[in-house]
Image (spheres, rainbow, N blue to C red):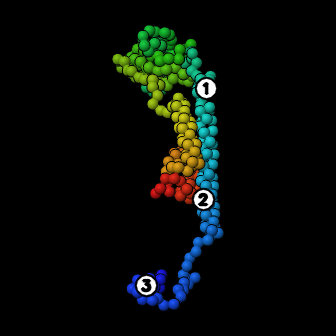
Amino acid sequence: MAALRARVQARLDGNEPSDEELVVQASALTVETPQARDEGNDWLAMQDRDIDRWRNLAAALILVGSILGMISGVLILQGNPTNLLESSLFNNEASVEITGLVLDEDGRGLENVSVALQDATSAAVLQTTVTDRDGYFTFENMANEPHVLVVEAEGYTTIERTFTPDRVELRPVTMKTGEGTQEESEGAASTGWTLDDAVGLSSIIGGLTVITAFAGVQAAVESRRGAKYRRAQYLAGVSLLSRGLIIIGPTLILFGMIINVLARSDYDDMRED
């Protein structure tokens, strides 16, 4: 090019150019042949196909793990122990028999102590009895609802105990010398963990398992589309909570997320970045 410029400038200046030939070194030229272009395009196409395969593999792993989570959630809901609670094992009987014991302060059974059973709401007397020589008393055909047990004896403080009958003995009633009335409560309310609470918790866990599994299915769809990398990963992270077969499902989803990281350059939003 420099020699060509010199010849043109010499002709413009009126000087005769030399007959020296222009020599171009072939090593200085880079010629892109059609074959070279085709080989480069083939390499890029093969690379894209490999990334697509990895992305599709990630989508398949996330989908399988989410389906396992969905199955686990359905099993939890179907195994809800509501029917068990309604069975005769836990269902309270309509009427029960109650046996109690009345003691003095020294722990000896008191005989001929008057024991009355009242309705907890209306205070109506339902049954009356007296203790035997060992201090025991029994009430039969008691409705399984709150009652008030009234224990009276001359020279002792009257005991009024609110309780709900069950199929076990009452806690012994200890009479103390004195006057007046002493109120007690037994089993009126329960503040501990109950089977009903367990049923509710089981239902909540089953519902959350199914919901997070659906998030995993959507994550698999996003991975297959290859449009939104971050959305696919976020949804897959939520689906880890689906706990498909305890650990198998989350493990598959986690491997799918790792493969997505390796194939993230194939997502549209990551290409824009």
Looking at the picture, tell me which residue is in the foreground, 115 or 166: 166
Task: Give the labeled residue for mark 1.
Answer: 83
Check whether the beta carbons of the residues at disc 2 and disc 3 lie within 8 A of each other.
no
Which residue is drawn at the image coordinates 59% and 33% (left, top)? 77
Give the percent coordinates (x, y) of residue 73.
59, 37
Which element is circle 1 on? helix
In this rendering, the label closer to the viewer, 1 or 2: 2
- Amino acid type, mark 3: Arg
Which residue is drawn at the image coordinates 50% and 57% (left, top)? 271
Q: Is residue 105 above or below residue 235?
A: above
Query: Residue 48: which numbered mark, if any?
Result: 2
Give the percent coordinates (x, y) of residue 256.
59, 52
Which residue is drawn at the image coordinates 45% and 23% (left, top)? 188
Which element is circle 2 on? helix
Q: Is residue 51 above or below residue 101?
A: below
Which element is circle 3 on? helix
What is the quadrant of residue 72 in the picture? top right
Give the percent coordinates (x, y) of residue 12.
40, 83
Task: Give the labeled residue for mark 3.
Answer: 11
- Amino acid type, mark 1: Asn
Q: Mark 2 or mark 3, which has the lower sequence index?
A: 3
Q: Is residue 18 visible?
A: yes
- Amino acid type, mark 2: Asp
Give the percent coordinates (x, y) of residue 39.
64, 67
In this rendering, the label closer to the viewer, 2 or 3: 3
Label 3 neighbour load within 10 Å: few <14, some 14-19, many 20+:
few
What is the quadrant of residue 181 in the picture? top left
Query: Residue 245: which numbered mark, if any?
Result: none
Q: Is residue 43 visible?
A: no
Which residue is drawn at the image coordinates 61% and 71% (left, top)? 33
State the separation of the CA atoms marked 2 and 3. Answer: 55 Å
